[in-house]
Image (cartoon, grey):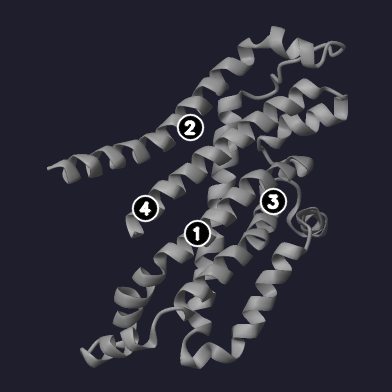
Amino acid sequence: MRLQVSRVSNSARHAAVPLGWLLVLGLAIAWLPEAEAWFRQVAPNSRSVIYQRDGFLDLVLQHLRLVGAASLVAVVVGVGASILVTRPLGQDFLPLVAQLASMGQTFPPVAVLALSVPMLGFGTQPTLLALVLYGLLPIVRNTLVGLQGIDPTVLEAARGMGMSNRQVLWQVELPLAARVILAGIRTSVTINIATAAIGSTIGAKTLGDPIIAGISNGNNAYILQGAILIALLALFIDSLFERLSRLFQ
């Protein structure tokens, strides 16, 4: 009975962590427009100290939507490519996929934006491309580690039970590698929450808007407001992944 109560207590405590960060984020969104006196101390010479071009809630949602779309594409491409190169027919392409994923993260996102704007124009699309390329490496790396780290005897046992290759993949390999794969996705998404702010330099609507406006106008209050919301959003999303990872223990 005590063990059951302890498990329920631990589960409730872990579930409360994401809700706690969500509450803090919500309070920050509501507090920032009312904190003029506080931010006046940060930027005493600025005419305006509260970013008002767009609402903070709208910026958070736009930022989250952009990161979510890029992360979804990166997961589909990264996990799919990793599965392909761990099959017998695709093993020859494994070094190529690993190198391309590494290049995607070593290539500066700002450079991706500069090169893609002439083709894709200003706004969301170049930012999406940069985030997808930048987010591939952790996903590919962890998926490969997770799939290649499965004990071969487990796979042989599954095939010995009459499972097809597809059944082995979906019912054995992916469940066993899920925790490692999820860790890569978690890293990718958390990194891109911060990286997405650069999209504001080419017209994408993100939480980088106050930061870019603050840099342009020498207004530290704007910069701080954007930075606070990006940090809280990253902590909230990271806590969600932490909670989700416990399901695979």
Side of 158 where 90 appears, left or right: right
- The residue pinned by badge 3 equals 127
Q: Secondary structure at mark 3?
A: helix
Q: Is residue 237 above or below residue 90?
A: above
Tags 2 and 4 in contact by the CB under 8 Å rule? no
The kind of residue on which mark 3 rests is: Thr
Q: Residue at x 79, y 34 (%)?
A: 212
- The residue pinned by badge 4 equals 246
Between the residue at mark 3 and the residue at mark 4, the CA separation in whole angstroms equals 32 Å
The kind of residue on which mark 1 rests is: Ala
Q: Nearer the viewer, mark 3 or mark 4?
A: 4
Give the x, y percent position of residue 130.
Answer: 70, 57
Name the residue nearer the viewer: 102 or 75: 102
Quick one: label 2, few (<14), some, or many (20+) residues within 10 Å? many
Q: Residue furthest left?
A: 1
- The residue pinned by badge 1 equals 183
Earlier-in-chain disc, 1 versus 4: 1
Between the residue at mark 3 and the residue at mark 1, the CA separation in whole angstroms equals 23 Å
Give the x, y percent position of residue 249.
Answer: 34, 59
- The residue pinned by badge 2 equals 21
Quick one: label 1, few (<14), some, or many (20+) residues within 10 Å? some
Name the residue nearer the viewer: 56 or 87: 87
Numbered label attached to residue 16: none
Give the x, y percent position of residue 88.
Answer: 47, 92
Q: Secondary structure at mark 4?
A: helix
Between the residue at mark 1 and the residue at mark 4, the CA separation in whole angstroms equals 11 Å
Earlier-in-chain disc, 3 versus 1: 3
Q: Is residue 21 above or below residue 68?
A: above
The kind of residue on which mark 2 rests is: Trp
Between the residue at mark 1 and the residue at mark 2, the CA separation in whole angstroms equals 20 Å
Q: Quadrant of residue 118?
A: bottom right
